[in-house]
Image (tube, helix red, strand yellow):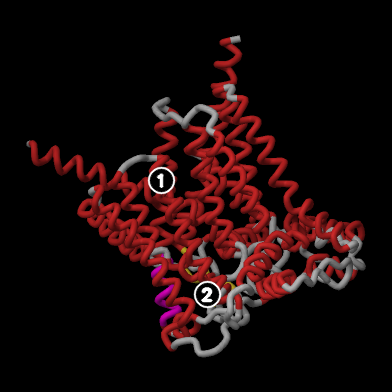
Amino acid sequence: MKDSTNQLGTISKVLTILAVIIGTLILGVCAFGAFTKTTYADNMAAQMMLEKADNIMLTSLLTGVVVISIVLLVLFLSSEKNINKMFIAGIVWYIVAGAIMIFFGRSVPGADALTVYRMGEMFANNDLSFINPTESYLSYYPQQIGLTTFLGMLIKILKILPYTFAYYHAIKILYVLLNCASFVFGCLLIRELQNDNKVTMTYIILSMINLPFIMYSSFIYGEIPSIALLLGAIYFFTKYVKEKGIAPLNMVLSLAMFVAAVWIRKNSLIFIIAVLIVCILVFLESKRADVLLFAIICGACCFLVIPLTLKMYENKTGSQVNDGVTATSYFAMAMQEGGRGPGWYNGFNYDTYTEAGMDAAKANEVSKAAIKERTEYFKSNPSECYKFYKGKILTQWADPTYASCQATYAEYGGRSKFFVSVYEGNLYNAYIEICNIYQNLIYLGALLWAVAFLVSALKGKKRDLQIDSLLLIVVTGGFLFHIIWEANSRYIFPYAQMLLIYAAISIGTLAGKMSMGSKNSDRD
């Protein structure tokens, strides 16, 4: 029995190391792409992704200067007292920067975000006519029911206030506070992963210069609330697993936040799948039945929350929505050229479903034929296949802004000259370059963390392999998924926030080693 347990533990470690190896290779690809190329859109209306070559020597030099500057700041500020001050400063900064975005950026919901927001307004007015089998956005994209309900609940609460205003302004304020929550959970998580003052200070500094994160606070969609919920859920889940005992509060909070994150943004299921993998790996090594039970409950709740919400609406209204645009049509579109980039949205999935009369079976037939045709083309033209997927990866993972300007471009008038320049003037180019250096150091820091983690794991010096590698497994899943799914650099934004954790550990550890080296030198 003991031998069997040891064998399962070994299998768990081997599988974890294999996952880390794959993740490390993916981070290597991302880092190489980011240091050599920058992808961006120079027209906010067309949003076509362009590619330019970077001067790798200059880019590396600038990234190195920023890393050294951060290390020096960390060495100067890493006392417990200063960490508390910087933590408060970080929250104040997010509030101030968010307020500036609200009052001077003047973004409004647009495209899909606007449609979902309007359905939220209908919900708040007790109008559920958006539950309709033919004349409803939800009959194409039923996964938006959670976000619709979330926004509707917020608007319903805001309607109580004795003021007349566009409710998305108040929702932006909530999103700014959710950014603060993400910052708090990030600090708690990094303390849980590596309780080191220099690492924590590094995370605080890196968070405060995360410009796309600030820009996205005015994007009324699912990214900001889901990121806050996911960081909170991962923190409580990490704390629960590392304590190596049943902790009901941590389990419940983690479960509730994971489910809410999926409810608001279905793509959060990639995070859930990574969590389930880690749960299985932990169970194989430790035989903790509670972790396996958590996985079963979490998986069931997360995969069922959106269908059950839809069913609740259908029972209440006596109407139904269709199954929606099929996954197969997304896979087909993901292999095609798009107006904005390789594999980006080109309308194929929507058009195919519409032309099939909202018949999923017919839409799948057309989509499978399109996949077969494209596969044959790639087989006959391997160089075109390489070019296509290279472009698809770069336009997503080498866009340092993560489409933050495109996502928040729509405005209601009166945008300040400064922000007009940020969106479509000279400051837009500066914004891209600043974000480019930031993205480089995040990828480089995360890659160095992965390499160091892998070396320690292979030497048998690393404990808690499974839980410490969770975020890397998440990013690996996201990278692989968006190779075969619709492309968009906005979809990569949540993964970048997770890599920030690893980059902080890497750069903070470097600062710690420099500090130790300095102390040893003083002794000599």
- Which residue lies at the image location 41% right of the left edge and 40% below the top edge? 192
Mark 2 surroundings: few (<14), some (14-19) or many (≥20) residues within 10 A: many
Q: Quadrant of the N terminus?
A: top right
- Residue 405, numbered circle: 2
> Would residue 445 be visible to someone looking at this image?
yes
- Which residue lies at the image location 70% right of the left edge and 65% below the top edge? 148
Q: Nearer the viewer, mark 2 or mark 1?
A: 1
Residue on which the image places disc 1: 190
Magenta residues? 427-436
Residue 292 at x, y percent in the picture:
64, 30
Picture quadrant of residue 251: top right
Q: Nearer the viewer, residue 210 or 243?
A: 243
Asked which secondary structure carries label 2, the reply is: helix
Mark 1 surroundings: few (<14), some (14-19) or many (≥20) residues within 10 A: many
Q: Is residue 405 toward the left or the right of residue 188 in the image?
A: right
Picture quadrant of residue 110: bottom right
Residue 71 at x, y percent in the picture:
26, 53
The residue type indicated by label 2 comes to: Cys
The residue type indicated by label 1 comes to: Ile
Q: Nearer the viewer, residue 160 or 401?
A: 160
Give the tally of numbered discs.
2
**Marks 2/1: CA–CA distance:** 29 Å
- Which residue lies at the image location 61% right of the left edge and 72% below the top edge? 158
Residue 152 at x, y percent in the picture:
68, 67
Q: Nearer the viewer, residue 467 or 255?
A: 255
CB atoms of marks 2 and 1 within 8 Å: no
